[in-house]
Amino acid sequence: MHPRPPLRLAAALVLSCLLGSAAVARADWADGRVPEGDNAFTLRQRDLRLSVLGRSAVGITDRVELSAYLPLYFALFPNLALKIGLFDGDASSVALKLGVGAGAYPVIGGMAVPPFVAFGFTGFVVAGYQTAEVDWSVRPTRRLTVTGRAGVLGLELGVVGVGGVVGPGAVAVLPILGGGAALGGVGGLELDVVLGPRDALVVDASAYYLKGADEGLVITTAGWTHAWEHFHLMLGAYTFLDLPHAKLWHDGHPVGPYANLYWSF
């Protein structure tokens, strides 16, 4: 497996073109829809949101949104997601979300066993994922949105490199190839509350589970966002829950603070 350069190039070109044609977006949530949440709503055509730590997005049309985690995209893990609005009504909305990502990271290591034997490795750890998810948002009131999410997750991990052994009177160099893949599920439940024209609250619980590995993770966040004309500030807290044993990921520190910045254009 490799980091898919065509995907990386295509995503960069598309985002560059769309950023250049972005229009002015609204800075408040007068319609009760909160773009900071992970819900079924899509940005309006040519609306642009840039996020420091979260997902940045641009509206291709009123029903199609393209997004990516830009810090990871440029630094570590190229990724891209497409959200398509299937239905958008006054009381509920449904969207299909597709995502891909891939990356390769150099690894160099070695060790020595006295008196004369040494081992070494140089190569890459490669990884990739694919997701398909359906989001269903229900609005009992204009200020409250409840969203349920469910989908599938594909994950691949591999190692490509060269290993060597040096011993008394012998040197051996061998290629090293290995890896595997897993299929799992993703889901979540989110509550978006519009507190005022420029204040909103987002509470979310997202679950990830890998079949066969018997491993799961629930990420829970709660954040408050205040909006200025083009600048949004989010402050909140998060926690990780390890499944199926429900063991807190951070022993002794189960809850941590977080902050994020958004720009709307």
Image (spheres, grey):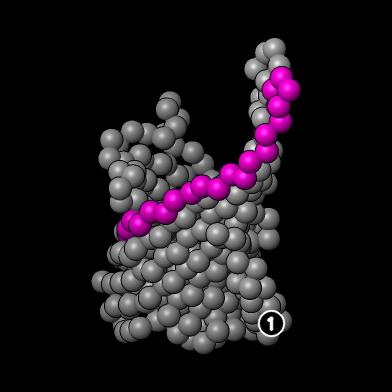
Residue 261 image offset from top left, x and y in percent: 61, 58
Residue 200 image offset from top left, x and y in percent: 45, 62
Relative to 111, is 139 above or below? Answer: below
Q: Residue at x 67, y 73 (%)?
A: 9
- The extreme top residue here reads 115
Relative to 249, is 14 above or below? Answer: below
Please tell me whether residue 185 belongs to the stretch shown in magenta: yes
Res. 14 image quadrant: bottom right
Number of numbered tags placed on the structure image = 1
Give the prevailing secondary structure in the magenta stretch.
Answer: strand
- For the magenta stretch, what is the residue range? 166-188
- The extreme front residue here reads 169
Q: Dot 1 lies on which element?
A: helix
Q: Which residue is drawn at 51% across and 41% down?
A: 257
Please tell me whether residue 141 belongs to the stretch shown in magenta: no
Q: Label 1, on which residue?
A: 17
Q: Badge 1, how many Cα within 10 Å: few under 14, some, many 20+?
A: few
Q: In which quarter of the image is the N terminus?
A: bottom right
Q: Given the image, on which type of amino acid does mark 1 rest?
A: Cys
Q: Residue at x 38, y 69 (%)?
A: 132
